[in-house]
Image (cartoon, grey):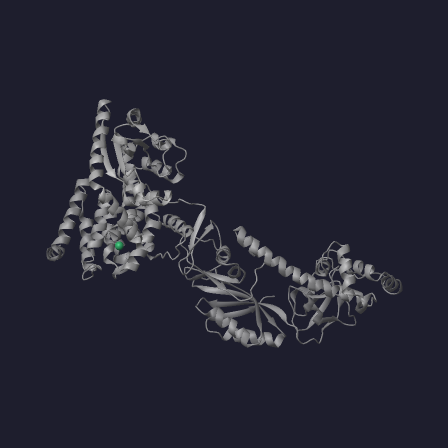
Amino acid sequence: MSEPAKLSESINPQLNERFQALLAKYAAQHPGESAAQIEDAFQLALSLHAGQKRRSGEPYLIHPLEVAHILADMTSDGTCLVTGLLHDTVEDTPITIDELRKRFGDGVAACVDGVTKLSKLKFYDREERQAESVRKMLLAMVKDIRVVLIKLADRLHNMRTLGALPRDRQERIAQETLEIYAPIAHRLGMGKIRAELEDLGFQYTDPQAHGEILEAIDSKRKANQGLLEEIRGAVQTKLRREGIPARIEARLKRPYSIWQKLKRQKIGIDQVYDLLAVRIITDSVKNCYAALGTLHGDWHPIPGRIKDFIAIPRPNLYQSLHTSVIGPGGQPFEVQIRTEEMHRIAEEGIAAHWKYKEGKKGDLQQDEQQIAWLRQLVEWQREMRDPGEFMSTLKVDLFPEEVYSFTPKGRVIILPRDATPIDFAYAIHTEVGNQCVGAKVNGRIVPLKYGLKNGDVVDILTQQGHLPSKDWLSIAKTSKARNKIKAVINTTERAKAIEIGEKYLEREARRLGVQWKKITKEQLVSVASEYGFPKMEDLHAALGYGKFSPRQVLIKLAPEQVEEAERVSAPAEPAAPAQAKPDDKDLVIKVKGLDDVMVYRAKCCNPIRGEAIVGYITRGKGVAVHSLACNNVQNLMYEVERKIGVEWARAAEDTFAVKLTVYTDDRPGILSQLTSVVFHEGSNIRALEAQPDTQRSDGSAIISMVVDVRDKKQLERVIAAVRRISGVRDVDRVQ
Ligand code: MN
């Protein structure tokens, strides 16, 4: 124990003096409690930050020490003070959270960790909407409200010493303070800290306006000072006369609130007549109303300025009566009337709730407009005997219906709870959504159906030309994503249907002996309009979707030819593929001896050129073509008479889609390498999706992809090339 003592002797006397003052504050607030951890934290911070200097040239330790002082002024508990002293050690010195945990316990470790995480967040965007989401997100992210208090104390001290920083950083930090931290202090009801943050933020974001307001106030200082004293005296006299005990504060309004008023009312500083404000703090709610009545009895109230926040507290539990009156000599001034208890809550907010066990009962609960969390806060406070326990158990779940996630660049994306990476991708951009093939959350590949959590950093993996699939509709939670997915699916399905419908019609025309070349576009358009379609494409699409048969169209175009053909030859049209939507790729397979039979490649084995194949006549869907090696073939072939010979047609340009599964290490660059080897083999990736391998816990991934190949040989080359990529463990063709 002699070593720390020596250290403290050798330290800067100013630091030592401030630390002694901190201990004194703590001892006064927590009589009889040990300050050993606080002393230990100070010694540790002293040695860790040794040699580090603030921009002002002062020793760095001044900062954590002053942060601890601000916390002590909120009457914070020991954990808060220890965290205040250590809050920058993990970020700026070699010590780790685990080491802090061993030395100071879980509470301190969790708080330092929380503060460190918050300071790593970057708030890039400056939009108003974005500021609101950052505020919400920040509150939603912290598990222990003490983290917010420490963060606010940290920011307050940084704002107090902002003068030492270069101008651009001053501006950025001050802006962030006004947009993020002051509103959070406000939301938590911490009026005092909020006021100081706002005035400092104002001073650095708009030094000119700030200067002008100070100057204007200063030029009238003497007159104002006299007025304030006069008003104070007059109020005092009246209240005494009525027997209302009261403490009276008379003050000038804050520069920031004057500025807000100037902006709101679009007036100049000389037009602001009520720079003066009086606060009456009395002993009971009854006396609040009595004081209001007394003032209004003698001085004329300004209409529309009376507000009863006692009967209807603000959402942050603020309570007061507000009014403005025309006082002595026609001088208007603002009045706030409240009890001591209300005053404490107005100044300290959440910190006030936390430090006194004997919470006020009844009144606070009456108002239904209080937002749920603050009501809950008060409830919990009653249930728990130890306020420290109360605070550390408290989980701030202010906005349970929303999740706050980030892009890798720090932009906040707000999504509904249970949203997935697909929602995230569409929230960024429609194309990012459409081309999404996988996602990394906090650096690791996750399934697309992963439920996003607060604070997740999401990196969307995209593949050019990729399109969403139907099953995404069950994964996406936001209506934006769902609508975009539906739109793409409808468009591609329609394009396919048009193509199929067109070919189907032509083929049937040939079969029925209709002289197709003599049919004009005009004739087709006119048939289309008979069906109520404005365009020929609509007619083709309807045929492709199987809404009616080509024969119905052809009989309108060339009734004699169709009837003649049917009378002479076939008994009937072959079973029309009502629901079948054969791919035009199927035309590369021919049924032996027959030209005009609908064929399609069976989904179960998806045969490709070069493989031995066999046809099977289905009921109403044409001929299914299987690979001879297909497992289903044996079972399907029990009706031998429905088996039919098929062969590959000669068209050489066609390709086949084949689904592959790649088992691989999840390492950076794997996707681009995969893309490049497939491309190198002259093949094309039609779809790709990366998922973590849930069977393994070592960060392996499974990549599903659909490649287009010409034949069996090309497929074998692609598979071999993918196998050669380092990190790839195996490749399967999906049957
Ligand atoms: Mn700090």
Decide if residue 581 is on the left or right side of residue 256: right
Residue 208 seen in this snapshot: yes
Give the number of marks: 0
**Quarter of the rendering containing residue 472:** bottom right
The quadrant of the rendered image in which ligand 1 is seen is bottom left
Decide if residue 405 is on the left or right side of residue 341: right
Nearer the observer, 256 or 517: 256
Where residue 607 sits in the image (x, y, percent)?
65, 69
Question: On the rendered image, what quadrant is the C terminus found in?
Answer: bottom right
Hey, which residue is sitting farthest top in the picture? 242
Where residue 456 sits in the image (x, y, percent)?
41, 56
Where residue 64 sits in the image (x, y, percent)?
22, 53
Question: On the rendered image, what quadrant is the N terminus found in?
Answer: bottom left
Vertical arrangement, residue 344 with respect to residue 2, above or below: above
Vertical arrangement, residue 130 with respect to residue 692, above or below: above
**Quarter of the rendering containing residue 313:** top left
Vertical arrangement, residue 404 with respect to residue 646, above or below: above
Decide if residue 601 is on the left or right side of residue 92: right
Nearer the observer, 232 or 447: 232
Residue 352 seen in this snapshot: no
Vertical arrangement, residue 344 with respect to residue 144, above or below: above
Where residue 24 sits in the image (x, y, percent)?
15, 44
